[in-house]
Image (cartoon, rainbow, N blue to C red):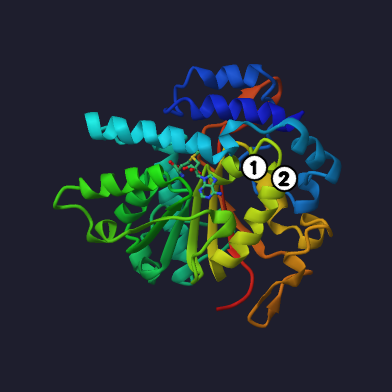
Amino acid sequence: MLLERKKSSCSEYWSTLDGGDDPHAMDGLEGGHHDNGHHGAAPPAAEEAGAASEEEEEEEEEGDGSELGLQSHWDDVYAHELALHREHGEQGEIWFGADVQETMADFTARLAAAVAGGTYAGPGSLGERGRPDAGGAAQWDVLDVGCGNGLLLHALAHRGFQRLTGTDYSEAGVQLACDLLARLPAAASPALRAAALLVDDVLASKLAAPFQLVTDKGTLDAVGLHPTQGAARRRAYRHAMAHLVRPGGLLVITSCNSTTDELIAEFTMPPSEATPASNGTLNEEENGSEVYCCDPAFDYVDHVRSYPVYHFGGSSGTRVCTVAFKRRGSH
Ligand SMILES: C[S@@+](CC[C@H](N)C(=O)[O-])C[C@H]1O[C@@H](n2cnc3c(N)ncnc32)[C@H](O)[C@@H]1O
């Protein structure tokens, strides 16, 4: 089953740091990771992308989760990393590796620059370069959910984003991120020094103002791996994002546990399909004049096309995807 296949490859992925020459890469493919749908081309329509049926979601609830979906796991991980940092100065793991982090930050910066500058011309149209300061996106309020050690914020600051917030439900993770900021050299970006780091559960966020840009590297994956409530928590995550991303704002997700097409299907399908009637929360929500009981909250914008493609058994795919969405509605 697809989710089992991806979960195991994700766990392997998360236990390694380097994407490029990772010896686990082919192991993951040999274990059945042969058709994850990443082909680097423009994605099919959401209906064709094969959104999980109710039955599939129920199956997921029964057995596809892991400890990676539990806060206790992340508290342990970051307590360990914090101790290593304080003893040896280590910065902690870069989830999915440094290459993916840099690619995601670069893609996000180019996309934000194009959207803010009014030059965005559709999927696949982003130029090689582009910095947020060009079109005013440098002043966007940016939130990284599930920021862990906060290193993605460093990469975003490096590309010119000025107003940065990172949140994580693990206090030890946020503490590690704070310690890393406190040790920055004097020449480091003032924006990074001024970044806000907060303990916050994205599924029950206390953040008030919506953000123009929300980033997520591995957090939705973790949310969906809860041992008994993975599908329900992914629904709650989508609901949370509809509040955290300002209308017209961007959501950029990097995942190793969903394909590009699956993320598109999940985030652009109408809530009536995405949310069972038993979970009535979405149907009661309003945002200004916009009631999104009948419309999807997000539109697909673009995705990273440069991740290495692996071929196996006549199929091809990438081991990680980064997909950008735009929150429906105007400011
Ligand atoms: C795979 S790690 C990625 C960490 C970080 N984004 C990075 O790229 O290094 C998943 C992160 O999501 C956080 N997380 C999981 N569920 C969360 C929730 N409901 N609210 C906030 N953070 C959460 C975990 O504590 C962990 O830091």
Quadrant for the C terminus, please.
bottom right
Quadrant showing the N terminus? top right
Please state which of residues 72 and 14 is positioned toward the viewer in this rendering: 72
Instruction: Specify whether 81 is left or right of 20.
Output: left
Q: Residue at x 24, y 35 (%)?
A: 86
Residue corresponding to mark 2: 231
Mark 1 / mark 2, whichever is N-terminal: 1
Disc 1 residue type (three-letter): Gly
Report whether 266 appears left or right of 190: right
Labels 1 & 2 near each other (Cβ < 8 A): yes
**Residue 178 higher or lower than 38, as above or below:** below
The residue positioned 58% from the left and 17% from the top of the image is: 27
Residue beneath label 1, please? Answer: 224
**Which amino acid lies under the numbered mark 2 shown in the image of this protein?**
Ala
- Residue closest to the eye, 122 or 98: 98
Q: Which secondary structure, mark 2? A: helix
Task: Look at the picture and state if 123 lies above or below 79.
Answer: below
Residue 28 image point, x, y percent: 60, 21
Q: Residue furthest bottom?
A: 289
Report x, y in % for residue 252: 53, 54
Q: Residues within 10 Å of mark 2 (few under 14, many from 20)?
A: many
Residue shown at 69% from the left, 25% from the top: 34
Residue 82 image offset from top left, x and y in percent: 33, 36
Residue found 61% across the figure and 60% down from its top: 240
